[in-house]
Image: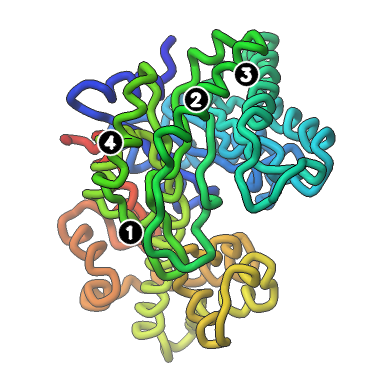
Amino acid sequence: MKHPLTAILETHFNQVRTGVYSICSAHPFVLSAAMLQALADRTPLLIESTSNQVDQFGGYTGMTPVQFVEYVHEIAGEIGFPPGQLILGGDHLGPNAWRDEMAAEAMLKAEDLIRAYVLAGFTKIHLDTSMRCADDPGDPHTPFDDEIVAERAARLCRVAEDVFERSPKASAPLYVIGTEVPIPGGAQEELDVLEATSPEAAGRTIEVTRNAFRKQGLESAWERVIAVVVQPGVEFGDATIVEYSSDKARELSTHIEKYGGLVYEAHSTDYQTRTSLRLMVKDHFAILKVGPALTFAFREAVFALSQVEKEFLSGVEGTTVSDLPAILDRVMCDHPKHWKKHYHGSEREKAYARRYSLSDRSRYYWPNQEVQDALEKLISNLTRYPPPGALLSQYLPGQYRAMRDGQIDSKPTALIRHRISEITGDYAFACGLLCGV
């Protein structure tokens, strides 16, 4: 049976130029909103976890690959999303989490990571061995040797293939190779213009990796390599967005046509316009990764509802408001691990970034129990006391219109998911997956 991702990408090189978007988030509201989008569009849904989020030791989410699969399937069950339409991917799988260790030890852990992902049912595997380990030679600020990167990627592919061949339940993995610069999740420096990967560099990544696969006897696995990660010239920082330029990416775009069915995978496409996203898909950047923009939209909706709650329910006898934005900020200040190295400047500037930075480091704090309790109180208050339309029009005008049109009801959960779906809708449109497009 053909993998649904393969089926989508096989149509890409005809006049339709379809693509697929990848949800890179573990947030339950983001996942449920994306599932509702895919249900409406009658399409599969690609959800990915990174090697930092989910690994054999739990990652920063505390979930192993098996637990992440169970978690996603639990949300799908609540939404009524068919499990057969879920595609699970592993992003940047390699020694990244153990780059401070010696290469031999780091690669053994990376092998265990790959093994755990494939056994858990992940069928889209991004092999990323582009990072130096502690004893690897060379300047850490320069690209790592292509031959070593390719050799290590092939080694990890060999592990994935062995798992697939020996496990009756495992599906044949699809592979993505290459990496992007700068690192995913948003750049930390100020941005203006970002150079796209050169066609020569993209071609070398493909050729060197293909040769490494052949040396490992992985010819059949190479047939399942679907994409190459490159830098299309897009990125976002705390307050800046580098917009996609089709003209600047043209040479890179046309270069992939030489490789018979391969497409590009583009990371950090968050905050690109709907028009730019569609242009990217047409230019063979047919796999679009999105993450922080979705939790940013969630945060926008929750902060807007908090304002509605404050104006509507402050002083109502027997009711206390959630004060969610203040609680979130206090928790972030009490536990600065996830933002301290990223947000700089004066105290005022850091306070602003904690709330409104496009890199959205607040996404790491939503699982905190205090923050969760505040969110539950907010939702409970506005469920018990539905706010007037005028306040919804003031703070969530798009959701108010959707409610008036009968697309959603007035429950806070529906309003939040709809705000997120305004982003997923852009990606579905760009990929030619939006119902009726």
| Quarter residue 252 falls in | top left
- Inspect the image, locate mark 1, and give the three-letter code of the amino acid beneath it: Arg
Distance Cα–Cα, label 2 vs label 1: 39 Å
How packed is label 3: few (under 14 Cα within 10 Å), some, or many (20 or more)?
Answer: many
Q: Nearer the viewer, mark 4 or mark 3?
A: 3
Contact, CB < 8 Å: mark 1 with mark 4?
Answer: no
The quadrant of the image that shows the C terminus is top left
**In the displayed structure image, the side of residue 199 where residue 160 appears, left or right:** right
Evaluate whether residue 80 shows in this view. Answer: no
Q: Which residue is mark 4?
A: 283
Q: Is residue 433 above or below residue 98?
A: above
Number of numbered discs: 4
Q: Is residue 223 above or below residue 352?
A: above
Q: Nearer the viewer, mark 1 or mark 4?
A: 4
Contact, CB < 8 Å: mark 4 with mark 3?
Answer: no
How packed is label 2: few (under 14 Cα within 10 Å), some, or many (20 or more)?
Answer: many
Q: Nearer the viewer, mark 2 or mark 1?
A: 2
Q: Which numbered disc, 2 or 1, marks the residue that appears first in the sequence?
A: 2
Q: Which residue is mark 3?
A: 212
Q: Which residue is mark 2?
A: 206
- Inspect the image, locate mark 2, and give the three-letter code of the amino acid beneath it: Ile
Q: Which residue is mark 1?
A: 419
Q: Which numbered disc, 3 or 1, marks the residue that appears first in the sequence?
A: 3
